[in-house]
Image (cartoon, grey):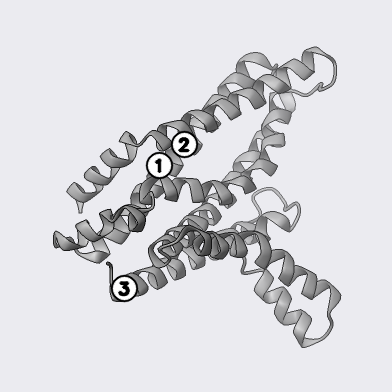
Amino acid sequence: MKRYLAAEWGRTAARPQFRIALAALTALAALLALAFCWTGREGVFQGSFGDCMALLAPFLTAGLYLAVVAADTVFSEQYKHHTLKNEVACGIPRVRIYLGKLVTAAGAGLLAAFLALLTYTALCRLLIPMEAGDWPAVQIFLFRLLGALPLWLGALALTMAAMFTFAHTLPMLAVVFGCLMVLGPTLRGMARLGAGPLAAGADLLWRLTLSAPMDAGAAALWDPAWLGWCWGVGLLWAAGSTLTGLLLFARRDIS
């Protein structure tokens, strides 16, 4: 497994789309920090370093969709290019193939997120003054980041399962974005507009969607119930998607 992971990482790092995605995400983080600095000098934004960190919290939801990019940089349409068939023909166990690509995608995504957050934080700290009361705002960002991490991993596992299951891009994207963008709002609308057991069931199912914890509104700082909700939902999707993807891939006829 160690050698397979090393080979997967080498292939991923050599792909132009991975380097482009890494550079683009880091550049966007830098531009956001520079925009806050410029608006501060123009008198539009009069916040401190802590305010800049707190303003980043809503952007954490984008990690659900960036998980699709991380998975694609690793899987890279292997059904279309017939490279997955070659791996199976070489005798590599399918479980190793699946988990190796999933772990590599998680590493690539976490690296991209780390570099982007490091760039943003460093620039904001250098260019925007820090005030005495900034620590609570920084804690809010760290709290939201800790809750977003398992949800992002769940989205990544869902995307990887869809990529292994569907040979064509359109049905794969329909499943992934349907779960991320359509399922949560639909169930929440049913819960709000309905009544009785149907509404209660829709509300329960909405709470199990990946977008629900981030869309539920503000939570008390370091609230264990909210963190438990995030980690429970994220790990549920990660484990369920991985198990489903493994079972379907084990039975798939790769031609």
Circle 3: element type: loop
Q: Mark 2 and mark 3: span between their CA atoms?
A: 32 Å
| Mark earlier in primary sequence (2, 3) | 2
Up-down relation of residue 52 to residue 18 (above or below): above
Circle 1: element type: helix
Up-down relation of residue 116 to residue 65 (above or below): above
Where's residue 229, x and y in %?
61, 63
Q: Which residue is mark 2?
A: 112
Q: Which residue is mark 3?
A: 252
Quadrant of the snapshot with the N terminus: bottom left
Q: Which residue is mark 1?
A: 108
The residue at 41%/48% (across/down) is 106
- Residue count near mark 2 (Cα–Cα under 10 Å), binned few <14, some 14–19, many ≥20: many
Give the label, 3 or 1, closer to the camera.
3
Circle 2: element type: helix
Is the Cβ of the residue at disc 2 closer than 8 Å to that at disc 1?
A: yes
For residue 96, what is the image quadrant?
bottom left
